[in-house]
Amino acid sequence: MSGLPSLNANLEQEFGLINPVMPYLRQDRIPHIWCPGCGIGTTVNCFARALTDSGMDLDKVAIVSGIGCTGRVAGYMNLDSFHTTHGRAIPFATGLKLANPGMKVVVYSGDGDLTAIGGNHFVHAARRNMDLMIVCVNNFTYGMTGGQVAPTTPIGPTQTTMPYGNFENPFNLPFLADACGAVYVARWTVYHVKQLAKAMLDGLNKKGFVFIEAMSPCPTLYSRRNRLGDGVDQLKYYKEKSVIRNGADTKEVGIAYQGEIVVGKFVDRERPTWLDSMNSHFGSVFGDRFTPYGVTDGQE
Amino acid sequence: MSGLPSLNANLEQEFGLINPVMPYLRQDRIPHIWCPGCGIGTTVNCFARALTDSGMDLDKVAIVSGIGCTGRVAGYMNLDSFHTTHGRAIPFATGLKLANPGMKVVVYSGDGDLTAIGGNHFVHAARRNMDLMIVCVNNFTYGMTGGQVAPTTPIGPTQTTMPYGNFENPFNLPFLADACGAVYVARWTVYHVKQLAKAMLDGLNKKGFVFIEAMSPCPTLYSRRNRLGDGVDQLKYYKEKSVIRNGADTKEVGIAYQGEIVVGKFVDRERPTWLDSMNSHFGSVFGDRFTPYGVTDGQE
Amino acid sequence: MHADPKGVLTGIHFIDGDHAACEGALAAGCRFVAGYPITPSTEVVERFASRIPLVGGVFIQMEDEIASSIAILGGAWAGKKVMTVTSGPGLSLMMEHIGLAVITETPCVIVDVQRGGPSTGLPTLPAQADLMQVKWGSHGDYEIIALSPNSPQECFDLMIKAFNLAETYRVPVFFMMDEVVGHMTERVEIPAPEDIDVVDRKWTTKKPGEYNVYQAGADLVPEMVKAGDGYRIHVTGLTHDERGYPAMNPVAQDKLVRRLINKIRDHREDIVDVREDGVEGADVVVVSFGITSRVAQAAVEQARVRGVKVGHLRLVICWPFPATRIAQLAETAKAFVVPELNMGQMVLEVERAVCGRAAVLPIGHAGGTVHEPATILNKIMEAAQ
Amino acid sequence: MHADPKGVLTGIHFIDGDHAACEGALAAGCRFVAGYPITPSTEVVERFASRIPLVGGVFIQMEDEIASSIAILGGAWAGKKVMTVTSGPGLSLMMEHIGLAVITETPCVIVDVQRGGPSTGLPTLPAQADLMQVKWGSHGDYEIIALSPNSPQECFDLMIKAFNLAETYRVPVFFMMDEVVGHMTERVEIPAPEDIDVVDRKWTTKKPGEYNVYQAGADLVPEMVKAGDGYRIHVTGLTHDERGYPAMNPVAQDKLVRRLINKIRDHREDIVDVREDGVEGADVVVVSFGITSRVAQAAVEQARVRGVKVGHLRLVICWPFPATRIAQLAETAKAFVVPELNMGQMVLEVERAVCGRAAVLPIGHAGGTVHEPATILNKIMEAAQ
Amino acid sequence: MAKSEIRVGGLGGQGVILLGHIIGKAASIYDSKHATLIQAFGPEARGSACSAQVTVADEAIGYPYVKSPDYLVIMSPDAYTQFAPQLKPTGTLLYENELITIDDRLPAGAKALGIPATRFAEELGRRLVLNIVMVGFFAGVTGLLSKDAMEKAVKGSVPKGTEELNLRAFRKGYEYGVELIGAATVTG
Amino acid sequence: MAKSEIRVGGLGGQGVILLGHIIGKAASIYDSKHATLIQAFGPEARGSACSAQVTVADEAIGYPYVKSPDYLVIMSPDAYTQFAPQLKPTGTLLYENELITIDDRLPAGAKALGIPATRFAEELGRRLVLNIVMVGFFAGVTGLLSKDAMEKAVKGSVPKGTEELNLRAFRKGYEYGVELIGAATVTG
Amino acid sequence: MSSNAPVKQGKGTIFVRTEICKGCSFCIDFCPTHCIEFSREFNAKGYHFPVLPRPEDCTGCDLCGLYCPDFAIYGIKFKDIEKRRQAAAPEPLVPAQP
Amino acid sequence: MSSNAPVKQGKGTIFVRTEICKGCSFCIDFCPTHCIEFSREFNAKGYHFPVLPRPEDCTGCDLCGLYCPDFAIYGIKFKDIEKRRQAAAPEPLVPAQP
Ligand SMILES: Cc1ncc(C[n+]2csc(CCOP(=O)(O)OP(=O)(O)O)c2C)c(N)n1
Ligand SMILES: Cc1ncc(C[n+]2csc(CCOP(=O)(O)OP(=O)(O)O)c2C)c(N)n1
Ligand code: SF4
Ligand code: SF4
Ligand code: SF4
Ligand code: SF4
Ligand code: SF4
Ligand code: SF4
Ligand SMILES: [Mg+2]
Ligand SMILES: [Mg+2]
């Protein structure tokens, strides 16, 4: 950050003040690549706040991303961070987690990455209740490649591969996660910064497959292209059209183009994780001959 | 079939009788490869009966399979038949259907094929309401490769890659299909031959993504290995433990090891197919300049 | 056969290679495309998506490249000419279905707009490092055809050739562009439909009952039918006999794999396409393909000014490799200079063809941009010593 | 370092190649395997699944090969030695992650028990036709290491070598078995742990702050850390600088790709491993690998009885290819005979190495079984003329 | 004229590529010349640096990259910083003179001609036509391509319904350019 | 002894591979010889044809396939049909004589020794031990490997808890074999 | 069976291709009238196959056929055979289409 | 600002790295007290950035900071600065961990 002039810079220096998000970032990589009014950076603030509030040892938190604009989050976080291939953040994270269960592993990626090419890993990790926290920044489009239709794009808006408007039915992501067995499912928008930060905190503290959908504007390729204005206009739409319905039936939270947005914490339940099941199963099969795996591994 | 002696053979010859399934089969490939007591062949009988009852022009019915014991069905059916790669029957069928909408396209494959490696195609085709009838022969295992754990294996039984008993949570397939938007979802077992045939008939007559789960014994690798006896013993278990609950909430129809089996037609709804949506959308965008695609194509 | 006028945008355009490639496909009769976005290839399908509704056909964006690469095979068996479009990472995901296309002899065109690799590499910058991959990337033995245009005009022209070859030989044909050619805009002239020759599928004239789906004549290429025509065909990725039935033994394997390979190897001299500039009797021959050929040509011309007897052999078809022609030239040339945007791939083929009879000087490049013409010029000068 | 006794089943066993390979991995310290069943490789992971609970580690059957091939990379960055196991169709699906392993320099072992191809081909029958694929199957430029055992004992022994090479060079190492070796049962002797040398990961001794995740010394191989150690590393499949940060320009590309390639090319002579039998001064040299070497050896011995001066060069390491050694032998040998269970892959490398100085006689085979020893014998006799 | 090389630089969203596209189109379609346009953008293109390279020549163009341009058309300070040093010593810089300040990065001997294109565009009612003002300025100043060809290229490249606005923007830039050149000639 | 080649054939489920495995194990672990076992099964192995090839030798084995076996151990009619013609003219066929009938497929000169192994197995209470009866029969008839080594190999290869039953099956076959050979020798 | 009228002992009968039967007993266990049983002899593959010891009970319902995974058995009603007998042409007793 | 006590005009203040601001106006639109506005001048990238024309209204709640997608702004309460001033060591005002 050196070299970038700041308002009140001397005050900052005198008191050693710093933007509270900064220590969570690789500061030598700022400014980032995201467009003006892109919501991804805002979700990062929420994540940083959740990390602060969790009191976790950040050396034991890893972040894994796929490819996409959101996929770049891993590269900016000052954590052990992995920027993998398109769609495959979840299986990479699965390997990381299983090979070192002492880590808290967060997957942070885009809607296309996690649910188009990565959809299979998503449903299977949820089914297995793999102990991962998934943050899906849903901007309803493929940002990085220039605004193609995504499995989340509502019916209506124009995308480059739906040049006359999308006619394909999208996923309802919270429902999908729920149907596959996620233990925690929430949706917030980038307007709901505090709730989003809180959901992320919940997610960090929860064991098992956690799914958090963060609706976020892509002014460059989604809203401007569809004459919906800039990022801030999308945030205003989120503010106006969202209704908080904690515990809502996930079946009912599908999203229509510029329609009502149901947000909230939809699912919060308990289920043994894959690794817990393995340990308790082998414990009962082998008795004392079996040393529970990964229980002390994190400290190694 | 020539050369195989038959009881009452001269009677057959005299009256030109023939097993009603035979005309639907590539008879020069019988006997087939399936084990004694394997249920796959029984599902084929049901499919043949459904084809008879549908009165369809069989030249316009194609069958697509992936790889697996069930995947061999395509090779035995006397239809245009495609034995593709493991997990990819659905996208192949999607291409076939979209490139020649006049065909009725049936995907016939195993649980591992359709929901392990093929899971992503499954959820996306359901989401799009691609006009395909999917028959999933669920034997709760990977038959062809020798009995490994499948995403359908209930908790408990031993499989070669779960050598001390499976501890991993399985999918509830009807729920998954439902959550992704299938328009018709049913489950029957190989014991329920008539209902299975009827479901297949329904499926042939239905437009859109149809999912039929056919529970089937794999004596070689599932039941015998778990001391549950032969195929016929599994059929008896199906008979004993199944309850017909048409319209059941798919959330409630998960299967536990040798537990109760909820069978029936769970979902039957209307939703435009992908191609119908495309045609009506382009029709409204382009008006007369657009010629509806595939509407007469089948007759080309 | 002439092109179907519906797909032909006759006239003069100022468009980039990606767009021109799409127009080539439409002119060639491609009516089904399944794809998944990836830089720097996406514009090809974006244009297809916008053009196809009024041409008559379908574009579908699939959930990934695996799905795209097999959806087109389904489309081909339903009777359409088909294409998918991708770049390195997507191509790596398509490898299983390249093999399926090969063994089922399904005509299809796979466009690979090459970018820097390996892995995610340099998504927006050029490379030519997938050359070996298109030949060897799937398991088992097989042969394919690969073309490499060096301008938007060629993206149009050669795309028609690509489809024609796919239909003639029933083989997957790779259309190996690169980021520079894909995103470079130049004048592209699209002829009238009647001036475009397209090859129709090799439809059978046999009746159901007489027809075997994998029975081939002297040219080793079986005739094709489509689903719905009443032939009740069986098509499988297993080793199969002429009826298409699985045949799980070494004899069937030998018969099938040998034919699949020989249908290309036997026609190698018909298929190869090189563009030659002063190679006959040259002391130095520069061998290149794709965008690098434009850079190399500049260097060749500069070298000629400096008095070097240098020729330029450009591969329009990279696979099958023109080994025979290069071997001929090796009789007289002193040296071959091989610039390519990779760390040495085509040069391996050149070395084998030259077989020690002349020097072979590679000019590797890790990609991300094209060579400096001066680098090639220097190597030519060195070779001319 | 010696093997961790927990994983070592010291003693004499009568087991097949698949099982022996699993034991080799356990002895080498492999503690995380992700896999997906496929004939004829599944027994490797089946055994691992049954052995690992009491050894200490994890096996997970993933939803497909794509997931398996990247789960192990996650496992490696978490600090474990890792492996995945597959056959041709699965290997084709892993190609994108081979590239990721290469560019992120993640040590891992990929077992490919080869079967007849292309496509689904002959699932239960042998081939050696993935040789080129393991070298070239992913997009972009890279180098890898590949070993090829010819017996269950070697499945054990060479597997340890495979892990050691993966850790030494931080590169994906292919373990190229075939159906015959995988399913062949023979006596396998597993030594005591203290008689097994295993190479530990090249852990850094630097402190956080001093350490750059992709800074390499003279051997071009960077030191490694694992997630959770407090280094806050960044690892990406994009072209990156020494800090691991994306660096999207040709200069960074050149630096990175050149190092990735040279860390193998520069150590080629350390890595290559050939087993020689009477090649020095031989008139005919048979070059082979894997199961074919056992058939070839039988033919070589028969030829010697017939008075031919024939040697046998067997590649234990197929990649990097021992071009130098073959070039040396080409100075004196009249001919090379190259039997392999494919339609001519290794022979291309032999031809290039020989460079016209001797005859090169391929003996291709479409797979499904091994060669007849007589076929090889005849070719040796022909070569000896 | 053998060959002219042009580099256009600015920010994503300023219409940099379209600017290059119009020049290339004018040359290759309406002025019977050859033109090659190369676009450069990073994965991080959105809102950040963006540039186009145009080569215009009488004969077919081989090597497509522009190394030391004859003309530099610059719309952002970053682009100036990056590209100014590459300009041929005999070359001409055309720049947005309310955003960019010339310094010693510009090779000695090179001409620098500024235009308040953003202000002109805002005056025309649409900030977005900034690039078309620059196109006009380029046409007026360089005379490389005929005005007619340039106008046709503008018309053929902008969204339907905006032709008039864009032509006005073009002419504004053109006239300013012609005038400036005249003035320059007089005072120079 | 240089090298003995054995082919075992039957149906999936009959324990064909285990039969071969026990012979190989006896040779290579308990009798200090070399042995190579090759199994052949199709994708359609389940319940259909299945075979094993065992080579036993004093020295390391190169070429692992059995082309014309010295011994043929056959448990199903299909296997007989397929493999009988391959038997060496000097070889020995060991077969389940209630399932299989010898015909002219057997090379002239080859010995054929039958055993009602299924019936014996059923008498022992477990149809499944058919293959172990055949192992015993092989041991008794051929004497290729020591009885001790064979018994150890049986014990070490069958599921825990079934050792006794299997050893009984082995001995049943062994004794029947020894007797038959004795008889054969007497009558032969 | 040299007459062209089937010997009626019940409402129907079965036809079995004994050689392709794999002895799974689906037909036997799920025949609604329990009229079939396993043969005592083996077929060439070593399986017992179904026989009809109580022909009078067979209704020709073809449930055995619908169950048989090996396509080795089917049942037919005599009235359908009769229809067939009455029809002139010896076409197979199946829907016309396939 | 040469004194080491911040000039208090409200409960808190903001700090802006003007050069990395991309002018998205999130901070401005969602500041609960509407105390910030766009500057009239551009930064080097041509964006307007936030300024604090009504410092008396700023609570230092840092909602602007939580919204800012470019990490270009944050707010802080004077009492937190005061705490910091009182503390001897000039450690950064952030949790100890990272
Ligand atoms: C295998 C593969 N296919 C395609 C791509 C191209 N690609 C990169 S990011 C992306 C989609 C990004 O969309 P999303 O995940 O929603 O992230 P966003 O950019 O919207 O945050 C695609 C298709 C790739 N990198 N790799
Ligand atoms: C890419 C790939 N991976 C793995 C395999 C191996 N394989 C063949 S079938 C199969 C699973 C079969 O299970 P299922 O789909 O349930 O069919 P079933 O045999 O049980 O009917 C597997 C893993 C393959 N052929 N291709
Ligand atoms: S393209 Fe969209 S998602 Fe990507 S950085 Fe820009 S605004 Fe954000
Ligand atoms: S292995 Fe199982 S599924 Fe496969 S044929 Fe045998 S019984 Fe059927
Ligand atoms: S036709 Fe019906 S009654 Fe007759 S045997 Fe078959 S199932 Fe039983
Ligand atoms: S159902 Fe078929 S295979 Fe089974 S016993 Fe009856 S006839 Fe035989
Ligand atoms: S700190 Fe709070 S009150 Fe102050 S400017 Fe920021 S959002 Fe507004
Ligand atoms: S939110 Fe950040 S980037 Fe946006 S205007 Fe405010 S300071 Fe600038
Ligand atoms: Mg997105
Ligand atoms: Mg199954």
Image (spheres, coloured by chain):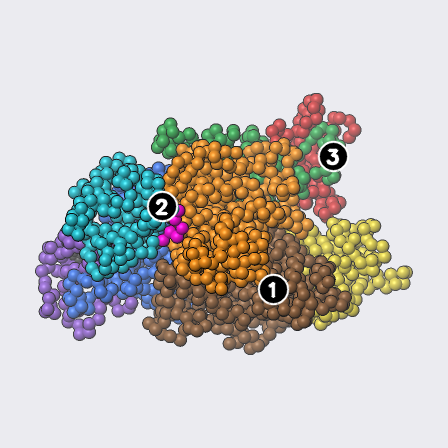
Chain colours: A green, B blue, C brown, D orange, E yellow, F cyan, G purple, H red
Q: Amino acid at mark 2?
A: Asp
Residue G54 seen in the figure: yes
Mark 1 element type: helix
Q: Nearer the viewer, residue A42 or C268?
A: C268
Residue at 24% x, 56% y: name it: F110
Task: Check the residue under mark 1 and report the chain it is in.
Answer: C
Q: Amino acid at mark 3?
A: Ala
Q: Which residue is mark 1?
A: C354
Let me know if residue F117 is in the magenta part.
no
Which marked residue is nearer to the observer: mark 2 or mark 3?
2
- Measured as percent of width and height from the top left, residue D145 is found at 53, 48
Please give left or right for residue C149 compared with residue E180 in the image. Answer: left
Which marked residue is nearer to the observer: mark 3 or mark 1?
1
Q: CA distance from mark 2 to mark 3?
A: 86 Å
Q: Which residue is mark 2?
A: F58
Q: Which residue is mark 3?
A: A9
Q: Nearer the viewer, residue F176 or C270?
A: F176
Query: Magenta part of the protein: which range?
Result: F60-65
| Structural crowding at the residue carrying mark 1, measured as other residues with C-alpha within 10 Å and reported as few (<14), some (14–19) or many (≥20) | many
Query: Any mark on residue H53, and which?
Result: none
- Measured as percent of width and height from the top left, residue D339 is found at 46, 58
Q: Are both tags, 1 and 2, on one chain?
A: no
Task: Check the residue under mark 2 and report the chain it is in.
Answer: F
